């Protein structure tokens, strides 16, 4: 990735919130999330199950409508648009530039369609007049690129393994030549060795096709391998956001510290020193006062229980913790990983 490409902002997520209301109860799934994504970068979004990361990803691609905020996107044509507000006609043009890869390769593929038809489907929808031969040529090209054996493309998804099905999902997302791909737990359902293959494939494709990823995962070791920057979410809010290595080596938020302490190390002789997270994640329909993390935080003070921490820059990253300047927190030990 060149320095120039690094600096080109492709997506600005500004103050995005999502609330769900049911039977008079309002659940804040995502609250006031902001970050920027540069062209060619990978942004990892991590947090425990239920922290709002998938909802955030869905709001960004407009699979669901955000309640508030904007997503400023620089289109391939060079215009900047608020992707959350574009009308149907504009959406038809831009939709293909932002694609999503889903968590479960078993259920995200239609079992009644052959693989060649699954991969070709977005082309049919977006370019209905494209000649069949050209469509098939593009499908073959992308299938080869993602490492699928083109001899078997007339088969149905059930004939493929989990890793191959995820390759089919990636081919379907890439066939329209997007700029951005939101990967929602894209490798979570796969065995560890297959995960590594898919991660390597995503990295190779990123280099080759100048792709930008938003990589949503609960697995910090996966996120660490693929991301340039990481955002940590807790109860619908970003609590820390910054460059991966910096954030992993010296976290400034106690929740990041606790998550990092639970990352397994591939060495049976290394003693895990896990920081236990006491208690349950609070109910997002009735979030706690002050810092949302205070009931589970071992550094909590009186102020934390009543005052919401400001989202501010500390040590070259953004963080929401009253004590971010003074605490000396334990990071991920890179020497153990090596
Ligand atoms: Fe812990 Fe207080 Fe920081 Fe919240 S603001 S993470 S409770 S120290």
Image (tube, rainbow, N blue to C red):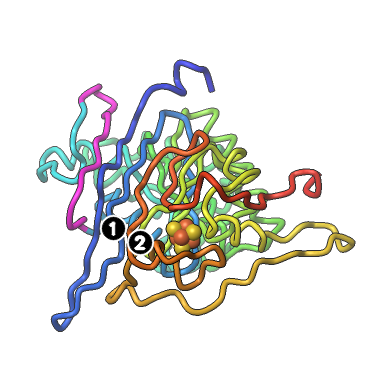
- The residue at 50%/33% (across/down) is 316
- The residue at 21%/41% (across/down) is 83
The magenta segment is 65-79
For residue 272, side relative to residue 208 (left or right): right
The answer to which of marks 2 and 1 sits earlier in the sequence is 1
Residue 284 on image: x %, y % = 32, 72
Name above or below for residue 14 compared with residue 221. Answer: above
Q: How many marks?
A: 2
In this figure, which residue is indicated by the disc labeled 1?
31
* Extreme-right residue of the structure: 269
For residue 314, side relative to residue 262 (left or right): left
Label pair 2/1, CB-CB below 8 angstroms: yes
The circle on residue 236 is 2
Quadrant where the N terminus is found in the figure = top right
How dense is the environment of label 2, judged by Cα within 10 Å: few (below 14), some, or many (20 and up)? many
Residue 53 on image: x %, y % = 40, 58
For residue 178, side relative to residue 189 (left or right): left
Q: Quadrant of residue 194?
A: bottom right
* Extreme-front residue of the structure: 302
Task: Examine the rendering and report whether any part of residue 104 can be seen.
Answer: no
- The residue at 41%/30% (across/down) is 38
Q: Is residue 135 magenta?
A: no
Q: Nearer the viewer, residue 80 or 273?
A: 273
């Amino acid at each position: 990735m060149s320095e120039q490409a690094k600096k080109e902002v492709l997506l600005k997520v500004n103050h995005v919130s999502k609330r769900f209301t049911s039977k008079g109860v309002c659940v804040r799934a995502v609250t006031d999330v902001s970050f920027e994504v540069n062209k060619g970068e990978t942004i990892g979004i991590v947090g425990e199950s239920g922290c709002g990361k998938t909802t955030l990803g869905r709001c960004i691609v407009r699979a669901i409508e955000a309640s508030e905020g904007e997503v400023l996107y620089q289109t391939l044509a060079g215009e900047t648009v608020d992707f959350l507000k574009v009308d149907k006609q504009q959406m038809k043009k831009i939709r293909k530039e932002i694609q999503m890869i889903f968590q479960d390769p078993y259920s995200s593929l239609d079992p009644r369609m052959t693989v060649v038809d699954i991969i070709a489907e977005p082309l049919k929808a977006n370019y209905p007049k494209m000649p069949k031969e050209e469509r098939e040529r593009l499908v073959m090209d992308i299938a080869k690129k993602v490492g699928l054996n083109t001899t078997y493309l007339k088969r149905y998804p059930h004939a493929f393994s989990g890793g191959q099905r995820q390759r089919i999902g990636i081919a379907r997302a890439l066939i329209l030549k997007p700029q951005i791909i939101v990967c929602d737990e894209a490798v979570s359902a796969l065995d560890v060795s297959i995960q590594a293959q898919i991660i390597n494939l995503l990295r190779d494709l990123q280099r080759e096709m100048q792709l930008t990823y938003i990589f949503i995962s609960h697995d910090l070791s996966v996120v660490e391998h693929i991301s340039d920057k990481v955002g940590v979410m807790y109860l619908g809010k970003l609590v820390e956001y910054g460059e991966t290595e910096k954030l992993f080596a010296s976290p400034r938020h106690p929740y990041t510290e606790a998550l990092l302490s639970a990352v397994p190390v591939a060495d049976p002789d290394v003693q895990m020193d896990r920081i236990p997270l006491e208690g349950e994640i609070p109910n997002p329909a009735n979030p706690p006062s002050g810092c949302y993390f205070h009931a589970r935080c071992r550094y909590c003070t009186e102020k934390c229980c009543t005052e919401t921490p400001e989202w501010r820059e500390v040590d070259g990253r953004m963080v929401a913790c009253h004590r971010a300047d003074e605490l000396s927190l334990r990071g991920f030990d890179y020497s153990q990983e090596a």
